[in-house]
Amino acid sequence: MTTYIKGTDNSAAAPAVTGTDGDTGLFFPAANTAAISTGGNEQLRIDSSGNVGIGTSSPAKKLELGGGNSYTAAMRFSYGSSAPTYYADWGYKSNGDGNVVFLTITDAGTARDVLVADYRGNLGLGVTPSAWASGMRAIDIGTYGGIAENSGGGGGTALYGNCYEYGANQYKYKDSYYATLYRSWAGQHQFYTAASGTAGNAITFTQAMTLDASGRVQIGATSAPTTTCYLYAVGGQYTFGINNGTYTWYAGTNGNSLNFYDGGGTLRGYLTSAGSFTNTSDLAFKKEIKHIQYGLADVLKMRAVSYLTKDNNVPQIGFIAQEMEIVVPEVVSGEEGSKGIAYGNITAVLVKAIQELKAELDSVKAELAVIKGA
């Protein structure tokens, strides 16, 4: 190969130092500046400040990589042969809303943007960052996820599910699906939900649960009285549910009463505003109705006792469940060691006993009347 030195600074099209190609080589475009061209176009420059520019003739930093199209990979790290299928590209591209930095990894020919940072300072993992509100700093995680500082003050951080904040407390769907939001805001933990919506549409969130700075939990409400846990019925008959994995019970308000429902939604009892508990006893709930077999003889078998509770020595009166189970088994429930008595249901037995006493008394009165009449 022949080397030509022309003894002049020359230009990119006609470098001062060339090989066989007269438009490829080294030239000196300015004082204390060297550059390299290929095919008549400048590719690299070292200026008088020691800054190196690749793809730019005016580097502003020690190394500046430039490009002229809308999607430019400035650096590539590759693995494999001269035509690798595994590599990582680092550069910038224009997304119509300013330039973004990107890292694209190509695996066996399939390219994926794994890291994108826009000019606002927002970051996308696997996606281009959403159009977050001005001044926010956010991270988009895949199609649905997101994390950001709270907008409009309040301190803390927010977690976004299938949504982003395009204005202060204004949200849009990322994809056509449900949306959720969690915020640590002004000393509170706030949880929001939204119905399924269309990508790009505005979202109306419902604040579903709040843990305030005093440690109080509000479910279905944004403020609460001075109670540790406050439940608010947004709609429907159930406010609170308990499930042990097999059985479910619900409690809910209806006017000024607190209702209790079984897992099938059947009302089983309610506590009125006057403080009385009422068992449901409507005819609609019953079948195979007949007179009870118990009466005065069974009442006489019941042993009424007084006792102290073992845990705190509180004086009580009542019955022993195991003894009552022998007399009226229908009023006893539970396993050995935790049996209980439905004291209210014993009323039916007592009424039957009183009716029998009344019948006996009426019989005695009738006999006395006959004797007096004689």
Image (tube, helix red, strand yellow):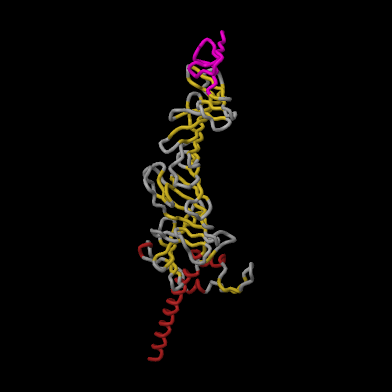
Tell me the magenta residue range: 1-29
| Quadrant including the C terminus | bottom left
In the foreground, 22 or 142: 22
Q: Identify which residue is drawn at 39% across, 85% down.
A: 366
Towards the viewer: 113 or 332: 113
Where is residue 272 shown, x and y percent of the image? 43, 70
Q: Total marks drawn?
A: 0
Rendered position, 30 above or below 210: above
The percent position of residue 221, horizontal first and vertical second, equals: 45, 60
The answer to whether 199 appears left or right of 14 in the picture is: left
Identified at 47% across, 51% down, the residue is 151
Q: Is residue 89 visible?
A: no
Position above or below: 278 against 38: below
Compared to residue 2, the image places residue 259 above or below, namely below
- In the image as oriented, which residue stretches furthest toward the left? 284
Q: Position of residue 312 (x, y in %)?
A: 63, 69
